[in-house]
Structures are given as structure tokens and as C-alpha cells.
Amino acid sequence: MGFRSGNGPVGRLRPGARDAEIARLAVPALGALVAEPLFLLADSAIVGRLGTLPLAGLGVAGAVLSTAVSLFVFLAYGTTAAVARRLGAGDVRSALAAGVDGVWLALGLGVLTAVVVHAAAGPVVDALGVSQAARPFALTYLRVSLWGLPGMLVVLAATGVLRGLQDTRTPLLVAGAGAGLNVVLNLLLVHGLGLGIAGSAAGTAATQVLMALALAVVVLRGVRRTGAPVRPHPLGVLRSARAGVPLLVRTLTLRVALLLTTFVAAAQGDSGLAAHQVATTVWTTTALALDALAIAAQALVGRSLGGGDVAGARAVVRRCVRWGVVVGAALGLLVAATCWPVAGLFAPQAQVRGDLAAALVVLGACLPVAGWVFVLDGVLIGAGDGRYLARAGLAALAAYAPLAVLVLLLAPPGRAGLVWLWVSFAGAYSLARLLTLVRRERSGAWVVTGAG
């Protein structure tokens, strides 16, 4: 693993060279992001052969785990920014020391969260409305898989370290190998040894732990090479935790917006809710490509600011924003143009198919704005501007919530209500986020140089 200090005049790079640098980080990052959903998809395919009840239990337990991990995504984002800044300043040893502190924080939070969720597993799955017949399967999968939760969070933090070091290829390789290993272990434990849903959970947990170890070994090689400390530094761990709190608030605002949208979608009837669920999946899938650009922006902006290269940081912003809008527009056209075939694939019923196609057209029209939002979000994360992102997230949520309530109260239920809901969520909410982010980007208040 080589480190790119990035102290050179990045701002003077030709657009083509800068685009190549963005692609070098974004393309492998996209591959790693795509590999993550494959874990739950593989589990679903394998457990599905056990019957409806185990699959239903997996769905509930998987939702709990996905929520827990998504809340701690700041472990990747915050670590990326901290490491990239120190790398840009030319202090690789300090960069790795900050990364090690982030990994220790992830391990501690993973153990603590696993203990808490294990103790509250019953009430947690009950809160999600699991049936009594599926409840034992949900509890089994959740409790066994929690052994892998510390590994999941360490994977986040270690991936953040490597992204900060301008290396997105290693996380891709580990994620790809992990996805393949997960399938093998699940087939062996579930059907080979007959362990049922517990075997699926054990296979996934073991895979996550092995992935965490693999990434930790890569980080430790850099630590030994530079002489950075392996043991956690209490002040460094505390600094990582404090930096993560605003990003946690930001993430919570996004989760609340999604939950509110689902709540309003449920009022549109079974057809509207079914269409909404598929549309949400399409939105999440397209977000992966945009998130990959945001990850590249995080790493490059953090490195540039750490090295005092303000011109380079602004140049990265301009190119990443352009690519975000272009990719968003291309994805939007693709989604809108294929709305009927996609709707037919996921929804054989005519009513659901029509509702879904209408929602996808709205979704596609809003993706260019979403691309701009994702990139600027990554820029401010890379700049370490977490406190502003927390405030901006709260402001955007405050603007969106009344619109969602108005859709609930005034829009006619059914297709019209679903369309207005997606206009509010993908359109108005994205626009509210964009306004807060553009305002900050144009003000220049995020441009703070140095190692931080």
C-alpha cells in the first residue's frame, strides 16, 4: 500500500488529469459500496430456501443491523477526513495514528452496541411488527449476527483510514472477497451442516470479522512502517468521538426523513406502499454511484486542505460537482426511460406498476440535484465541517417535514399522493439540502487548511 501525500500543486492539474484522479478513487469505491448489499442479498437467497418464516425473520433482523451500521457510518467519514488532512500535511505517521484511534473507537462502539442490542433484542424486533411465528427466527439471526457487529464497525473505520490514504482499491478487494466468502460459508453452514438461519448469521458474522482483520492488517503494516502507535491514545479516541457526533446527527436527520417518507407512503394504500418500497430501492441503488463521487471528494479535499492547497481543493470541488450533476442526469434519464420495464419487472399488478412508473419518473428528474447534493456533502465532510452539516441536516429536515405532512393530509391517496410524496422527498428535500450546502460552499467558511 503506497501513500500519496498530495503536497504538489493539485490546483494546477489539467482537468483530464484531475478527472483521472477522481476516477481512481471513485470507481473502486463504487465497487466496494456495491459489494455491501450483496451480503444481505446472499443471505436472503440462501435463507429463502428454508421457508417464508425464516426469510421474514431475516428481513426484520437485517433491518435492525442495517440501521445500527448506518448510524455509525461517521466512523468511515470522520476517519477519512482526519487521515486525509494529515496525509496532505505530509505527516503520514500522524495520519495513521489518527486512523488507529478511529479503529479503536469503532471496536469499542461495536462491542457496546452489540451488548445493548443483544439485551434488548426482544423489544427491538417486536417494535418492527414481527409476527409471533417469525419472531424466533428474527431473534436467532439477530443475536448470532451481533457477534460480527464489532467487525462491521471496524471495517467502516479501517476503510475510512485507507480512503484517507487515497487507497480505495484495497477496501474493494476485501469487500469482493468477503462477499464471495459469505456465500460459501452460508451455503456450508445453512444447508451443508443444517444449522438453518443460525448458520446464515454465523457465516455472515465470521465474514465480517475476517474482513475487519484483513483491513486491520493492511493498516498495521503502514503503522509499523511509519512507527505510529498501535495502542489507542485516549485523547485521540475522544477527538474521534467528538468529531463523529455532528456526523451522527447528520445521519439521524437522513434516517428520520426516510422513515417519515415511508410513514406517509403507507397512507397511500397497499399499492402505493409497494410502489414506494421499490422506488426507494432504486433511489438507494442510484445513490451508490453518487456516493462514490462523494467519497472521492472527501479524500481529495481533505488531502488538499491538509497540504494548504486551497486552489486544489476548490478545483476538486468544481470537477466533482460537475461529475455529480452529469452522472445524476445520466442516471435520471436511464431511470425515467426504463420506468415501465422496471415497473413491470418488480410489479406484475397493473395498479402497482402504474404507481411505480409515475414515482420513477419523478425520481429520475430529481437525480441531477441529488448528484450535486451528494458531492457537496462529501466535500464538507472531507473539510471536517461536521458541525455545519449537522445544522444543515436539521434545517433541511425542518423544511421537508411540513411538506410530508401536507401530502399526508391534503393529497388524494393513491398514485397522486405517491407522486406528490416523491416530489417532496426527492425534489423539495434534496433542494433544501442543496441550498444549505451551496450556501456553505460559496461562503468559503469550510476552507480551513492544516492538519486539523
Image: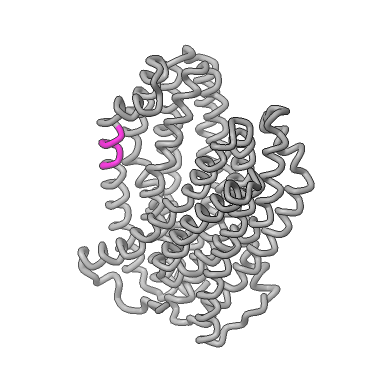
- Relative vertical location of residue 111 with respect to residue 236 in this rendering, above or below: above
View extreme (top): residue: 412
Q: Which residues lie in the magenta part? A: 330-335
Residue 134, image x, y percentages: 68, 32
Q: Residue at x 55, y 85 (%)?
A: 224
Q: Residue at x 64, y 57 (%)?
A: 148
In the image: residue 445, left or right of residue 119? left
Residue 262, image x, y percentages: 54, 29
Judging depth in this view, the residue of 267 and 431 nearest the camera is 267
Could you tell me if residue 246 is visible in this image?
Answer: no
Q: Main secondary structure of the magenta part?
A: helix
In the image: residue 120, left or right of residue 232? right
- Relative vertical location of residue 168 with respect to residue 67 in this rendering, above or below: below
Judging depth in this view, the residue of 352 and 189 nearest the camera is 189
- As for residue 332 lying within the magenta part, the answer is yes
Question: Count the marks: how many?
Answer: 0
Could you tell me if residue 269 is visible in this image?
Answer: yes
Query: Residue 344's image quarter?
Result: top left
Residue 171, image x, y percentages: 45, 64
Q: Residue at x 46, y 61 (%)?
A: 177
- As for residue 68 lying within the magenta part, the answer is no
